[in-house]
Every structure is written in C-alpha cells, then in structure tokens.
C-alpha cells in the first residue's frame, strides 16, 4: 500500500492494538507465535471457544479479516512473536 491507504491502515492498526484487552493481547501473541487455538487455550487456561471469541474481537478491532492479517498487523506494531514451545 502507498500514501493515504497505508497511513489509514497503520492508524487503524495502532488504535486497534491499544484497544485490546490484556487477554485479547495474549491471544494475539499466541497467534503471532504460530500457536493453534487449542494451544493458546491450554496456555491461558480458557476454553478453545473463548479463544475464538477473543480472536473475533481482535480481528474486528484491528480491522482485519483473518489470523494471518492479525499477525501481520501485530508485527507491524512491534508485537514480536515469542518462540513457540510446541
């Protein structure tokens, strides 16, 4: 992207990342690290359905349509992936 579209996308991502709850941020970190929903759920001690609900909210707040775009947005905002242990 170039110009105004890129500026808008970056601003939307920046605002969205700031709007995430602590749990949503942890779920996004798991996705960014390449973990499956089941692995994220186990790590956080929550149900897999809850992880899915958090990811739906994360994608809405970041204005993206899938997990890959969410991970790209997270990396663009300097949310570095942790080394996946699984």
Image: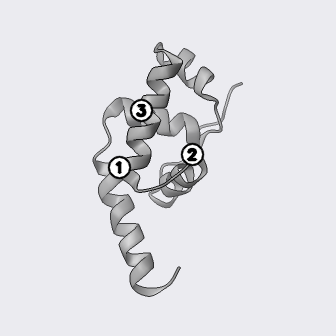
Secondary element type, mark 2: helix
**Circle 1 crowding by C-alpha within 10 Å: few under 14, some 14–19, many from 20:** some
Q: Earlier in the sequence, mark 2 or mark 1?
A: 1
Return the residue nearer the eye: 78 or 57: 57
Give the alpha-carbon distance from disc 2 to disc 3, as whole Å: 12 Å
Q: x and y percent of residue 64 in the render?
A: 47, 55
Give the alpha-carbon distance from disc 2 to disc 1, as whole Å: 13 Å
Q: At x 44% / y 58%, what residue is drawn?
A: 77
Q: x and y percent of residue 9 in the render?
A: 41, 69
Q: In this view, does 1 lie above or below 69?
A: below
Would you say the residues marked 3 and 1 are in contact, meaning their CB atoms lie under 8 Å apart?
A: no
Q: How many labels does the image show?
A: 3
Q: Residue furthest right?
A: 86
**Mark 3 highlights which residue?**
54
Q: In this view, does 43 lie above or below 33?
A: above
Would you say the residues marked 2 and 3 are in contact, meaning their CB atoms lie under 8 Å apart?
A: no
**Mark 1 highlights which residue?**
61
Return the residue nearer the eye: 6 or 64: 64
**Colouring rule applied to residues:** one colour
Which image quarter holds the C terminus?
A: top right
Q: Which of marks 2 and 3 is nearer the N terminus?
A: 3
Q: In which quarter of the image is residue 82?
A: top right
Q: At x 32% / y 42%, what residue is drawn?
A: 20
Q: x and y percent of residue 13 in the render?
A: 39, 60
């Amino acid at each position: 992207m170039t110009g105004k579209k890129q500026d808008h996308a970056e601003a939307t991502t920046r605002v969205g990342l700031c709007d995430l709850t602590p749990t949503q941020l942890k779920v996004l970190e798991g996705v960014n690290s390449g973990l499956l929903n089941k692995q994220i759920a186990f790590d956080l001690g929550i149900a897999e359905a809850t992880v899915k609900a958090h990811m739906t909210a994360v994608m809405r707040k970041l204005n993206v349509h899938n997990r890959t775009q969410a991970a790209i947005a997270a990396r663009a905002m300097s949310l570095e992936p942790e080394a996946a242990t699984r």
